[in-house]
């Protein structure tokens, strides 16, 4: 009985296969023609679409397309300009120039400037103009996020000078590389950690009973770096107002050393109640650093 049912199932399967094979043989030519027709139809539709797109773009709507491209370029330039300005360095901000008379037709010019950028420092040339004259052109710099003075000292003039203007030009901006200096404030403090003490100003009587000023201070270089010809601005103050400016450049300042520095002030001696000393060193210039002093020694581990 089971063998009879199995034979019936096999006959049904064979019958379905036979019917499908017969249908395929009878309709194969028609199916091939239908496939070719469908392929040709899709090809024609695609070709018509491409032709219509080209006609629409280059003939019908060419003016609108050109205008759209121009607008995209213009908007892109505007965005690019805005981005560039947002990433560029902000300009150096100078305060009002102050003129200090030294007597006998000589003047000191002093102005504080500020760099508000935290990632940019600048090199530049500067001079002061007054009446129809200009001072000698000097090189200057300003570090990131720094406020510092600029000065021109003992400028001679045949006429009385009441005011002057600062001229900055040839400004060259440099951006900090975070791969080289990851933490600039820490790096800066490690390079310019000076302790300045005993800054005093006194008035003394010298030759032919002329009065001159004398300033002295002590610098302790707490860094691991020795400096060649470091610059120090010395500001004389009456209250919070600056009433005198000078600059002194000692020959060296060794790492871990103390240095007593003094300078004289000739001419009109102002009333002073405090002295401020400001280091002015271009930390990015390798020429300001003195090479370590020492002698090579033998490594005894290599001796047998």
Image (tube, grey):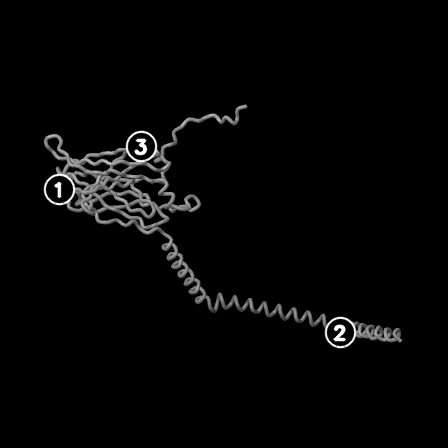
Q: Residue at x 40, y 28 (%)?
A: 294
Per the rendering, the mark at residue 252 is 3
Query: At 44% across and 45% down in the image, what residue appears?
Result: 179
Q: Earlier in the sequence, mark 1 or mark 2?
A: 2
The residue under the point 55% across, 67% down is: 51
Name which quarter of the figure residue 221 lies in.
top left
Question: What crowding class fits label 2: few (fewer than 14 Cα within 10 Å), some (14-19), or many (20 or more)?
Answer: few
State the image coordinates of residue 67 (x, y, percent, origin top left): 42, 65
- Please identify, in this view, whether the residue under mark 2 or under mark 3 is nearer the observer: 3
Asked which secondary structure carries label 2, the reply is helix
Q: Nearer the viewer, residue 287 or 133?
A: 287
Can the viewer see residue 289? yes
Calculate the distance from the C-alpha at mark 1 to the C-alpha at mark 2.
115 Å
Residue at which label 1 appears: 159
Task: Tell me the residue that label 2 is attached to.
Answer: 27
Q: Mark 1 and 3 residues: CB-CB less than 8 Å, in contact?
A: no
**In the image, is 238 to the left or to the right of 303?**
left
| Rendered location of residue 237, percent (x, y) | 20, 44
3D distance between C-alphas at marks 1 and 3: 39 Å
Q: Position of residue 157 (x, y in %)?
A: 15, 40
186 and 110: which one is in front? 186
* Residue 98 relative to residue 2: left or right: left
Quadrant for the C terminus in the image: top right
The residue lying toward the viewer, choosing from 287 and 39, is 287
* Circle 3 Cα neighbour tier, 10 Å, few/some/many (<14 / 14–19 / ≥20): some
Between discs 1 and 3, the one toward the N terminus? 1
Disc 2 from disc 3: Cα separation: 104 Å
């Amino acid at each position: 009985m089971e063998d009879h049912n199995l034979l019936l199932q096999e006959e049904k399967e064979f019958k379905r296969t036979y019917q499908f094979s017969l249908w395929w043989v009878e309709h194969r030519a028609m199916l091939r023609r239908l496939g070719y027709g469908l392929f040709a139809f899709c090809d024609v539709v695609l070709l018509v679409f491409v032709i219509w797109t080209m006609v629409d773009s280059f003939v019908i709507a060419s003016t609108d397309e050109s205008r759209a491209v121009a607008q995209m370029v213009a908007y892109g330039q505007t965005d690019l300009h805005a981005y560039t300005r947002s990433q560029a360095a902000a300009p150096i901000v100078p305060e009002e120039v102050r003129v200090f008379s030294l007597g006998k037709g000589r003047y000191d010019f002093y102005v504080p400037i500020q760099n508000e950028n935290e990632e940019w420092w600048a090199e530049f040339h500067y001079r002061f103009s007054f009446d129809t004259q200009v001072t000698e052109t000097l090189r200057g710099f300003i570090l990131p996020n720094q406020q510092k003075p600029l000065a021109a000292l003992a400028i001679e003039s045949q006429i009385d000078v009441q005011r002057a203007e600062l001229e900055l030009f040839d400004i060259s901006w440099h951006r900090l590389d975070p791969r080289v200096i990851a933490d600039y404030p820490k790096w800066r403090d490690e390079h310019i950690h000076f302790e300045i003490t005993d800054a005093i100003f006194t008035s003394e009587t010298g030759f032919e009973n002329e009065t001159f000023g004398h300033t002295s201070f002590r610098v302790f270089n707490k860094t691991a770096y020795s400096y060649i010809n470091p610059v120090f601005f010395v500001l004389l103050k009456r209250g919070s107002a600056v009433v005198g400016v000078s600059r002194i450049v000692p020959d060296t300042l060794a790492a871990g050393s103390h240095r007593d520095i003094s300078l004289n002030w000739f001419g009109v001696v102002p009333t002073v109640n405090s002295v401020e000393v400001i280091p002015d060193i271009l930390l990015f210039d390798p020429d300001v650093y003195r090479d370590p002093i020492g002698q090579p020694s033998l490594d005894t581990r290599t001796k047998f």
